[in-house]
Image (cartoon, coloured by chain):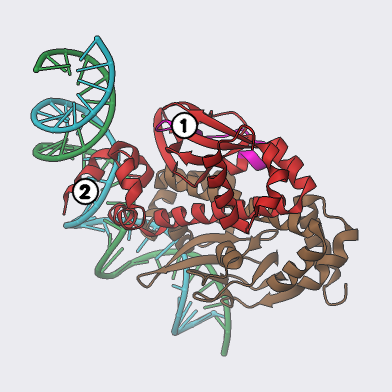
Chain colours: A brown, B red, C green, D cyan
DNA sequence: GCTGACCTGTGATGATCGTCACAAAATGGG
DNA sequence: CCCATTTTGTGACGATCATCACAGGTCAGC
């Protein structure tokens, strides 16, 4: 634990433990892949068109993923504390990312470097299991969010968010939320004001 | 290769090879997890509310995944030859499935039994890698489809499907497609007739 | 080749939402 | 505390789409 602050290591270790039952003894294998990285508001975690070569575990703050559609930014995800922010397809296949990930607040993360992570996985099969579980949890989230779009109207999506992710509604501005919900800013404002 | 027909084994082996570089020598580890399973039209691969305990590799025919929303069936995926049909969240976490998977045509599949697959993975780390790659490819598909919803209008979604999945448009009826695209059957009919 | 079940096309109508425009409110540096 | 910038609310209007209703088409089985 040389350049990782104690609090951050505790946090990421706890996270890995909830995923797999990762214990302190496995730490040495994965440790070299980790770095603390901080970002200022509006800094890029992943620039559009670049290949994603890391996973970012969010310690403090939040960031957003967004596409650029005809000059408009369409948010597709927000990552808060305890989340992993990444473009999993770009990461896994080495393709260029079609979207960006940007800090929405001052941000502290633990970066999992791809190359060093792969090296660790070759050494210790538990790291591969961790990777699979991580993938699983990302896929689960993705599906959950896709369902919202497929089954719900704008109003129902808003209500769903309010019930299941009240903290997201607290922290993300209305303008940013609207594109995430797939509706115009004005419409979201009106939905919110009807009761 | 006792109860798996030769043609089907060839096909699934080829599939696994495209995912990982799985070779015939690894076959013995995974073989006990596989069974050929056939379904009649409208048979269930996964009943809603049940836990998903298998992956189904589609050899011939196709099936659909759908939610029941206030009595209406909303299709969220179609699985064709070379696809893996499953509820990955239910499979991984043992939760009950919120949606159903049903044969839309007479269907031939190779079933990967969960328990036996896990046993094989414990024996042979290559099986775990295969599992991860499989998960990855499912996640990639899911994201691709979610993007359609988030970035496109009904008309654009239709055009996208026509360009990227023309075979899907050929094989799936308009009524079934409409809920997949998130629009009314009548609207899809009209979109299709404009040019 | 008839018949019933299912699928597709089409018109009329109303609801919802996007867009444009601008006002009000909140925010945050200096 | 004030001003500039950003964010949010609101009205008017039009476009798109869902819904209802029904007509025409297709297909399989008798």
Q: CA distance from mark 1 to mark 2?
A: 26 Å
Q: Is B65 included in the stretch rendered in magenta?
A: no
* Residue B103 x %, y %: 44, 32
B29 shown above or below A44 = above
Q: Describe residue A109's horizontal placement relative to residue C25 as left or right.
A: right
Within 10 Å of disc 2 (Cα), the crowding (few <14, some 14-19, many 20+) is few
Which disc number belongs to residue A165?
A: none
**Residues marked 1 and 2, same chain:** yes
* Residue A103 x %, y %: 59, 72
Which SS class for mark 1?
A: strand
Q: Describe residue B120's horizontal placement relative to residue A102 as left or right.
A: right
Q: Residue furthest right?
A: A25
- Front residue of this view, candidates B10 and B120: B10
Chain under label 1?
B
Sooner in the amino-acid sequence: mark 1 or mark 2: 1
Which disc number belongs to residue B102?
A: 1
Tell me if I can see residue B57 in this picture.
Answer: no
Which residue is rendered at x = 53% and y = 70% of the image? Answer: A95
**Considering the image in quadrants, where does the C terminus of chain A appear?**
top left
* Residue A5 x %, y %: 83, 72
Which SS class for mark 2?
A: helix
**Considering the image in quadrants, where does the N terminus of chain A appear?**
bottom right
* Residue A184 x %, y %: 37, 58
- The part of the chain drawn in magenta is B90-106
Which residue is rendered at x = 57% and y = 66% of the image? Answer: A93
Residue bearing mark 2? B192
B74 shown above or below C20 = above
Tell me if I can see residue B121 in this picture.
Answer: yes
Q: Circles 1 and 2: CB distance less than 8 Å?
A: no
B120 shown above or below A105 = above
Q: Nearer the viewer, mark 1 or mark 2?
A: 1
């Amino acid at each position: 634990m040389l350049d990782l602050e104690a609090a951050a290591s505790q946090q990421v270790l706890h996270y890995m433990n909830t995923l797999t039952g990762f214990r302190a003894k496995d730490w040495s294998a994965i440790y070299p892949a980790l770095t603390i990285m901080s970002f200022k508001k509006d800094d890029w975690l992943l620039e559009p068109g670049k290949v994603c070569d890391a996973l970012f575990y969010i310690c403090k703050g939040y960031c957003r993923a967004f596409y650029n559609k005809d000059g408009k930014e369409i948010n597709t995800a927000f990552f808060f504390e305890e989340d992993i922010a990444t473009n999993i397809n770009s990461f896994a296949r080495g393709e260029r990312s079609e979207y960006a990930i940007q800090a929405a607040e001052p941000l502290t993360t633990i970066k999992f470097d791809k190359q060093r992570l792969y090296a660790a996985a070759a050494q210790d099969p538990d790291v591969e299991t961790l990777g699979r579980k991580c993938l699983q949890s990302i896929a689960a989230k993705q599906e959950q969010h896709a369902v919202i779009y497929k089954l719900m109207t704008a109003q129902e999506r808003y209500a769903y968010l309010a019930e299941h992710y009240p903290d997201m509604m607290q922290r993300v501005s209305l303008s940013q939320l609207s594109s995430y919900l797939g509706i115009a800013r004005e419409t979201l404002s009106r939905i919110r004001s009807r009761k």
